[in-house]
């Protein structure tokens, strides 16, 4: 299972690099050419969301992007350290541990909008939170390489 891992400081200018790497690795993994724009857009949105969370919460840890090629699928996990700085993964409410009794901030609205955009681009998406922060996992099917006789 080939894996590529990127780590970058939470600077918006690094998001473009993550998008380019994701598209190149997805192409090599066998993701359909017609879907590569969606891969690029989804990774850009997930990385921008992670950068925003890092910057708004003063997180110094890098944003992580893990690209994994399996036999029948290609997955990308974008991780942020949002909860590692004191957020509560078990708190009720929206992803990221928000509390429904606390008024929503502009950053929370942007976070939810980013997740909505990603879910519109990716059929198989999972958002999970834990002690190390949040992770968005996106998966696309791959087509097996055709072997010519």
Image (tube, rainbow, N blue to C red):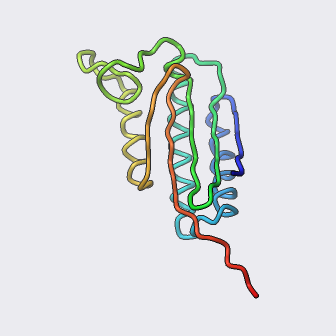
Question: Which of 106/136 is in front?
Answer: 136
Question: Which of 90/16 is in front?
Answer: 90
Q: Quadrant of residue 111?
A: top left
Is 92 placed left or right of 44 in the picture? left
> Which residue does the image show at 70% across and 39% down from the upper left?
6
Q: Position of residue 7 (x, y in %)?
A: 70, 34
Direction right: furthest residue: 149
Is 51 placed left or right of 101 in the picture? right
Direction left: furthest residue: 101
Q: Position of residue 131 (x, y in %)?
A: 52, 19
The correct choice, above or below, for 91 with respect to 111 in the image is above
Is 12 placed left or right of 105 in the picture? right
The correct choice, above or below, for 134 with respect to 102 in the image is below
Q: Position of residue 128 (x, y in %)?
A: 45, 33
The correct choice, above or below, for 129 with respect to 147 in the image is above
The correct choice, above or below, for 103 with respect to 25 in the image is above
Q: Position of residue 133 (x, y in %)?
A: 52, 24
> Which residue does the image show at 38% across and 22% down from the upper left?
97
């Amino acid at each position: 299972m080939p894996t590529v891992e990127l780590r970058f400081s939470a600077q918006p200018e690094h998001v473009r690099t993550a998008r380019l790497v994701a598209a190149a690795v997805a192409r090599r993994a066998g993701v359909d050419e017609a879907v590569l724009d969606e891969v690029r857009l989804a990774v850009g949105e997930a990385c921008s969301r992670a950068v925003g969370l890092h910057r708004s919460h003063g997180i110094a840890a890098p944003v992580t992007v893990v690209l994994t090629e399996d036999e029948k699928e290609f997955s990308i996990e974008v991780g942020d350290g949002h909860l590692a700085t004191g957020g509560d993964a078990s708190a009720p409410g929206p992803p990221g541990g928000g509390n429904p009794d606390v008024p929503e901030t502009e950053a929370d609205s942007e976070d939810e909008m980013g997740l909505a955009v990603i879910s519109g681009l990716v059929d198989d998406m999972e958002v999970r939170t834990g002690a190390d922060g949040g992770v968005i996992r996106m998966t696309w099917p791959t087509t097996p390489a055709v072997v010519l006789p």
